[in-house]
Image (tube, rainbow, N blue to C red):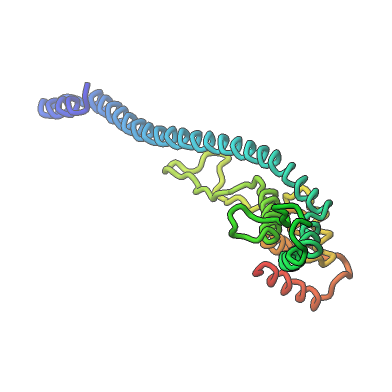
Amino acid sequence: MSVEQIKRDIVQAQVRGEDTTKLAKALKDALLEQQVRAEVAELQKIADQRIQYQKRAEAIMARVEKQSEAIDRFLALRDSVTAPLKAIILKAREVDLLKSEETCFSQFHDPFVWDSEARSIPKDYLPSGFSCPSLVMDSAILDSREAGSQALYFLNSAYGLLMNIKKGQMCVSLKPFDDGLGKDEGESGEEAPKRCAVCSHPELTSIDEALQQGRSLRDIEAEFGASRSSLCRHKAHLPAAPGTMSQESQREVETKATVEIAN
């Protein structure tokens, strides 16, 4: 029986002067049932919202997992590319390619002297069509010595840039979930502390030693692949080695670090 019908029955019973105790109890039960249904409907809305958030979270995690796999594939391909690239750079240094080219030009290739000397010899002494070989660029835009130097420079730069790429972790600050029911057990609104990139570096001990020895950030960056800005932030919570540096020296090092980062 509906609440409205029970109310009408109570009014009619009161008009007739009859006892309404049973009807009052029925009204109470009907109102309670109606209230419970309304509360359950509101709770269902909250549950639906949580389900929606959960699906969105699962979609985000799936995308992150795929991105992580893609990054791993890229880094694996990067390593397969940089390995022979490094070998090329080392081989060029080993054979001193640029020095060899410079020697060729400085000792043997002087077109003006060659032309003058060749013209001083009577005809038929030199073979017909005899010419002086030289290193030239097909495009005739760059001098071959400049082009060779630039090629090795860019190879070395490309290798350094590629090897400096690494897999990191991007953290986000999540809002505490509150839908009117309070936080679920185990939930916390505290933000996760930000991680120091250097503190999680596999060569942390060696980096700390290098920093405490006062080595330049540029050298440490080149050796370990940690950026100068990360190294500078790491120094802020790095305990100083006992008796290694005065406060005045520490200020000088910090000033030097700031200048290096700016450069």
- The image position of residue 154, as x and y in percent, is 67, 55
In the depicted structure, whether residue 52 falls above or below residue 245:
above
Name the outermost residue toward the left: 15
Name the outermost residue toward the top: 1
| Quarter location, residue 213 | bottom right
Q: Nearer the viewer, residue 11 or 110?
A: 110
In the depicted structure, whether residue 86 falls above or below residue 235:
above
Residue 199 falls left or right of residue 96: left
- The image position of residue 49, as x and y in percent, is 40, 36
In the depicted structure, whether residue 139 falls above or below residue 246:
above
- The image position of residue 165, as x and y in percent, is 66, 49
Residue plotted at (80% across, 48% down)? 91
Q: Nearer the viewer, residue 226 or 163?
A: 163
- The image position of residue 171, as x and y in percent, is 58, 48
Residue 212 falls left or right of residue 173: right
Residue plotted at (75% across, 56% down)? 124
| Quarter location, residue 83 | top right
Q: Nearer the viewer, residue 181 or 228?
A: 228
Name the outermost residue toward the bottom: 248
Residue 126 falls left or right of residue 57: right
Name the outermost residue toward the right: 243
Q: Quadrant of the N terminus?
A: top left
